[in-house]
Image (cartoon, grey):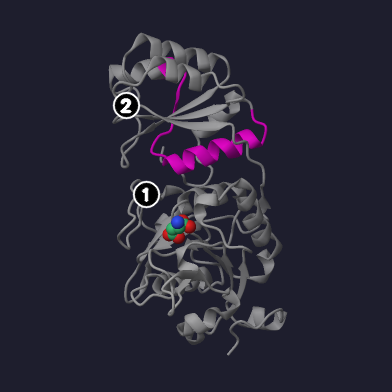
Amino acid sequence: MPNFQRGDPMLLRKYPSVLLIYTGGTIGMIQNPETGALETFNFDHLQNHVPELKLFNYHINTYQFNPPIDSSDMEPTLWAKIVKIIHYNYDRYDGFVILHGTDTMSYTASALSFMLENLTKPVILTGSQLPIGMLRTDGKENLITAIEIAAAKHSDGTPIVPEVCIFFDNLLMRGNRTTKINVEHFDAFKSYNYPALANAGIHINYIEDRIRKPDYSIPLKPHYLFDTNVIVLTLFPGIQENLVSQILNVPGLKAVVLKTFGSGNAPQKEWLVKLLKNAVKRGLVIVNISQCLAGAVEMERYETGIHLLEAGIVSGHDSTVESAITKLMFLLGHGMSPQEVRYRMNNPICGEITL
Ligand code: ASP
């Protein structure tokens, strides 16, 4: 059985090969039978905890973060670390599975989708609501199917899913379209504005026309730069002028994701429009994202949206907050002018918005 043997390039070529990157999170935990406490386990011994993996005729290697992190501690330098690992191992594996805490998984999936330009291999993120070492865990199912998807190929040898995705609770979703919506149930993620790329039941049913088709002649181009001078500002009835003013005038601030009402509406208060207009004039990029999870911003639809458009605010279309904020950090990190960032927010990089 070829599982878990390291470094033999012949084996890597003969069998489907997957690199499993364990960053941390609930999935990698087992319950200490004596104390009942949750402890992280050593992924070199993964097969002891998930013996089902032996049934795969795959070559699976593991890389684990040391120490593993709760995904609340995820940050751009760690995204860069993941991208470096993928880039370094790109030719050696058919696909990559990233085990990640659920809390910020959608941010990481969005960031990776922008960082891995010309991606031609599957990068599948997954995790679990219950630790892999617990009786009713969803972790085994998520892990096993994610590995199968990462290794899946068409008859011509090209991968079926050459995208950054999240696989969770039987659904394969485009990563930059996902949001964590549930802390309790196994269906922790939803992709409201783009349908699932595959459903896993008795068979894994891939819906081919929803999956991106990359150009296999262009090499992977990894990106590492982010500018974190950004903020998410949520509107609510009663929001105060002096607080909005303080936020928009924070020294160094370059971009704001403005979470508006409904189809992209905001209070018609004169002070708000004036503050936003002045901020845009000073070079701030302000992106309008709806507080509603499904549907798109349409600023032209109501008077309350039109004045935002007139203030120079950019539509975030049907983007998730996770995707909009990581895309802004990514574009600003590459030194783009406010004008260029605004233009690019209106054009998809890798399927993150519908136009
Ligand atoms: N707090 C954990 C994390 O995001 C939750 C999980 O793994 O699902 O790392």
Q: Which amino acid does label 1 sit on?
A: Tyr
Is residue 241 highlighted in magenta?
Answer: no
What SS does tag 1 mark? loop
C-alpha gap between disc 1 and disc 2? 27 Å
- Looking at the image, residue 297 sits to the left or right of residue 175; the answer is left
Compared with 276, 60 (above or below) is: below
Q: What residue type is labelled 2?
A: Phe
| Residue 38, image quadrant | bottom left
**What residue lies at 49% left-to-right and 22% top-to-bottom?**
247
Is residue 325 highlighted in magenta?
Answer: yes
Query: What segment is highlighted magenta in the picture?
Result: 309-336
Q: Does the residue labelled 2 lie within 8 Å of ligand 1?
A: no
What SS does tag 2 mark? loop
Q: Do the residues labelled 1 and 2 touch (CB within 8 Å)?
A: no
Q: Mark 1 points at which residue?
A: 194
Q: Nearer the viewer, residue 337 or 219?
A: 337
Query: Residue 236's mark?
Result: 2
- Answer yes or no: is residue 198 visible: no
Q: Which one is earlier in the sequence, the residue at label 1 or at label 2?
A: 1
Q: Nearer the viewer, residue 12 or 286?
A: 286
